[in-house]
Amino acid sequence: MPTRRQCFQLPASGRDASGSPGATKIGEYLFSGVITGHDPATGQLASGAAAQVAQAFKNLAALATASGFSTDDIIRVWVWLKDWKDQDAVTAPWTATFPNPASRPAAAFVAAPADIPGTQAVQLEFAAKLGGARQSVSIPGATLGDAFPTIAIKNNWYATASLRGDKGTTTAEQAELLHQRFKVAVEAVGASTDTVAHVLSWYRDHSSRDIQNGPFKGLFPIQGDRPNRHSVIRSLPEGIEITSEAMGYKGAFRVNYTMHGPRHGGIDGLWNSLPLGMSIGNLVYSAGTMGRDPRTDENSPDPTSQAELSFANTRALMECAGLSMADIGHMFVWYKDAASRKALDAPLQKYFPEADDRPAWHILQADLPGDMVVQVEIIAVRP
């Protein structure tokens, strides 16, 4: 039976241990899985953080080319670091890979010490789209440094970098400023906040999560017409309490989806104050879809049951949007502990049994709130 997804792998690099393809093409979009600093010819990991970062960017370019894309098609690169001290090693290979300062992708820097094994120091991941020329815009102070633009857009699809407030200010002040910068960035590429599709917020601890709600509601005041938002605890650079990154689609507007069971709260204690899923342009995004049982309205204490229900609820969301699991191009799969990580293997195999017909995915540990131990976050593409 014909499939929409095409999967790609770097020669001699081996398949990701979790079973993710190296990259998945679906429609005009390409999503990568985890890209490391291993030499694909020998399988050996480069020695030291700087050499690993340089090799990882070479692998990123090679994987894009092998998939029928180029580095000019990439709008977002996630840079996953074991230690923030290695972020300075990214600038040189970044500017070599993307030499035109007016046409660079957005970079989202994220700490992932629990997810980067052994002596690995960095992992990369990217999203790309065919057609049109990439444009990028920089706002002083909003991102890591001058080499990294605030926002990139290509063929109407846009992505921001990890936006932040100013170091040394309060969490509330940082949240307010980063949301102001969201608005400025989106308008700088000729779009509006009505076209923001998905927000991923990184915050230092659970006490910081709700502080972003005020400025978020200021940008997106209408319940039922908001982007997805997924908030995740992460280690952040010194002096930074919260960062956020977004994706959107210029010229299109949001359609929100809510469901019983895996409903999404997040603002003022109100269920569905944030959508579980949303459609914009030819893309569908989800927030973190939990393993809540729609029959009991509870999360099972059994990680295996929660993992299965997270994927079953994701399938139900896809059906709500008129799609299926075969339309998913990318997934973040979040787990809380070793038991919940082990529980992911069975549903991943069940819902994506064919190794050459899978979305690209990245499995990540997070301090999920309450009794949640698994969440699934997707990007799907309409035919």
Image (tube, grey):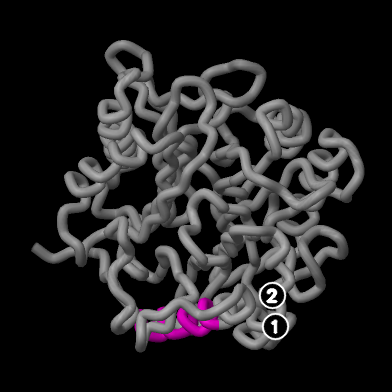
Does the residue at mark 2 contact the one at mark 1 (Cβ under 8 Å)?
yes
Numbered range of the magenta stretch:
55-68
Q: How many marks?
A: 2
Q: Residue at x 73, y 80 (%)?
A: 102
The quadrant the C terminus occupies is bottom left
Secondary structure, magenta segment, majority class: helix
Q: Which mark is residue 323?
A: none
Residue wearing tag 2? 89
Q: Which mark is residue 92?
A: 1
Image position, residue 34 (x, y; %): 43, 64
Front residue of 112/22: it is 112
Image position, residue 354 (x, y; %): 16, 59
Q: Identify the element where label 1 is drawn.
A: helix
Residue furthest to the left in view is 1
For disc 2, the neighbor class at 10 Å (few under 14, some 14 to 19, many from 20) is some
Quadrant of res 312:
top left
Front residue of 69/304: it is 304
Q: Residue at x 68, y 40 (%)?
A: 203
Image position, residue 130 (x, y; %): 45, 76
For disc 1, the neighbor class at 10 Å (few under 14, some 14 to 19, many from 20) is some
- Type of amino acid at the residue the image marks with label 1: Ala
Q: Identify the element where label 2 is drawn.
A: helix
- Tell me the CA gap for discs 2 and 1: 7 Å
Q: Is residue 383 visible?
A: no
Q: Residue at x 71, y 77 (%)?
A: 91
- Type of amino acid at the residue the image marks with label 2: Ala
Q: Residue at x 62, y 53 (%)?
A: 111
Q: Is residue 234 visible?
A: yes
Whether residue 63 appears in magenta in the rendering, the answer is yes
Whether residue 228 appears in magenta in the rendering, the answer is no
Left or right: where does residue 93 sit relative to residue 145?
left
Left or right: where does residue 136 sit relative to residue 313?
right
